[in-house]
Amino acid sequence: MRLVTLNLLMCNSEECSGRNQALTLNPGEITPGTTQFNHDLTIRMLGKLDWLAFVNAALRLGHELPDNITEADHQNSELIQRIFDILFNVEIQTGELLCPNCNRTYPIEKGIPNMLPQDH
Amino acid sequence: MSRPEEIAPPEYFYNEEEANKYTTNSRIIEIQAKMSQRAIELLNLPEPGCLVLDLGCGSGLSGEELTECGHFWIGLDISKAMLDVASERGVEGDIILSDLGDGFTFLPGTFDGAISISALQWLCNAEKADHNPYKRLAKLFESLYSALGRGRRAVFQFYPAHPQQIEMITQAAVKCGFLADLIIDFPNSTKAKKYYLVLYSGAHQNYKQFQPLDGDDQVKFSKRDKTHKKSKKMHKHSREWILEKKAKQRKQGKEVRHDSKYTGRKRKDKF
Ligand SMILES: C[S@@+](CC[C@H](N)C(=O)[O-])C[C@H]1O[C@@H](n2cnc3c(N)ncnc32)[C@H](O)[C@@H]1O
Ligand SMILES: [Zn+2]
C-alpha cells in the first residue's frame, strides 16, 4: 500500500459511517517502490489529496514537504517529482491502520490492507 | 457448465490454486484484457494520468489495462489469494482486501472513474444467511457514488444469470443516484456476447452515448434506464422500432448500420 492510498482510504466501520474518517498509519516494514514518474497524475492528485494529512503521514516516515502547494509549484519539476516519489514509491508492506474515532484497526500484510469486517 | 458463483463464495472459490490457474490461463488473460479495454473505452476518461477504481480487481488482469492507458488504479477484492497473486506479479496498482457488498469509504469525489470486470454477478448471490443481495448491491453503489467525482462513469462488465438480475442491479444503482445504460456487445454471438453496465454519476455534461459493438449486423440498442424506466413494452425492439430509431440516428448524422433482412431478427441465445 502506497501513501497515496493511505491518504484516500477512510474508516469503513459502522460507527464511522458517513464521517469520512481518515486513518493513521502504524508502520511496520516500508520498502521503496519502482513506479515510473507520471507528471499528469501527480498534478491531478494535488487537487484530490487531503494535503495536510499527506504532509503529516510523510513526515512521520521521514519525508519533509511544504505545508501548501501553489499553482506556481506545479512548474517546479523537482518538487513534483519528489511529491510523486513520496505518494507512489513509499510502499507500506506491513503495519496497521488505526481509526482515531472508533479505534478499529486494520492490519496490513504483504502490502495489502485488510478492510474486511472483523467477523470474517 | 455451472457458474462459479454457484459453487462457493468468492473468497473460497478463488483460493490459491484457482488464483494461479486463473492468472496463467492464456485464454482468460486474453478475454479479460479485451473486456477491460472495452470497459476503459466506455469509461471515456479525458486524458491519461487519471485515478481509477477497479472493483473485484482479482490478480490484476483488468488493472494492467488501466496501467497500459497511463492511469493509476486502486483495486478492491475479497479474495486474498487473488490479491497475493497480483502482488507477486508486481502490478502497478494498489490493492485492498475488501468485500464490495460491505461497502467502502474513500475521500469523497476523488476517483475519475471505475471499472469492474467479471465480478458484479458475484454480488447477486447470498453467501451467508444475513446476506441480502439487493442491500449489498446498494451498499456497493452508494460507496461508489460517493468515491466518484460528479459527471464520472463506472463501467461494469458482468455475467447476468437471468434478466431479473440486470433489473435488480440497475435498480440498486439508479436508487443511489446513478444514470444507467446497458450496452450489449455482439448480442447474437453465444461466445462473444458481453454485458456492460455503464453508470453516470450525476451531471450530464460529458454524456456521450456509445453504440454496442456488433460483428455481424444485428440489433443494436442501448438502454438508458432512467428515461425508459416505465416503457418496457416488448414492441420496443421490433423491426419497425429499430428501423425508426436508425432513421432518427441517421438524421442526427450518426453512423448507423444498414438495414438488412436480419434487422430486428429475434435473438436465439437469450441468456
Ligand atoms: C473473474 S474474477 C475477475 C478479476 C479481474 N477483474 C479480472 O478481470 O481478471 C472475479 C473477481 O471478483 C472478486 N469478487 C467476487 N465477489 C466479491 C466481493 N463481494 N467483493 C470483492 N470482490 C469480489 C473475486 O474474488 C474475483 O477476484
Ligand atoms: Zn472508525
Image (cartoon, coloured by chain):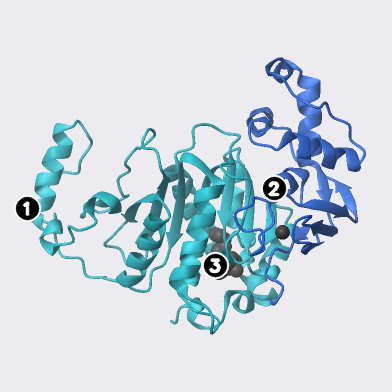
Q: Position of residue A55 (x, y in %)?
A: 81, 35
Earlier sequence position, callout 1 versus callout 3? 3
User: Residue, x 44% and y 82% (percent of image)?
Assistant: B2
Residue at mark 2: B92
Mark 3 lies within 8 Å of ligand 1 (Cβ measured): yes
Task: Give me the chain letter of mark 1.
Answer: B
Earlier sequence position, callout 2 versus callout 3? 2
Residue at mark 3: B101
Task: Give me the chain letter of mark 2.
Answer: B
Letter of the chain shown cyan in the rendering: B
Q: Residue furthest left?
A: B240
Q: Secondary structure at mark 1?
A: helix
Circle 1: residue type: Glu
Same chain for mark 1 and mark 2? The answer is yes
Letter of the chain shown blue in the rendering: A
Are discs 1 and 2 less than 8 Å apart at CB? Answer: no
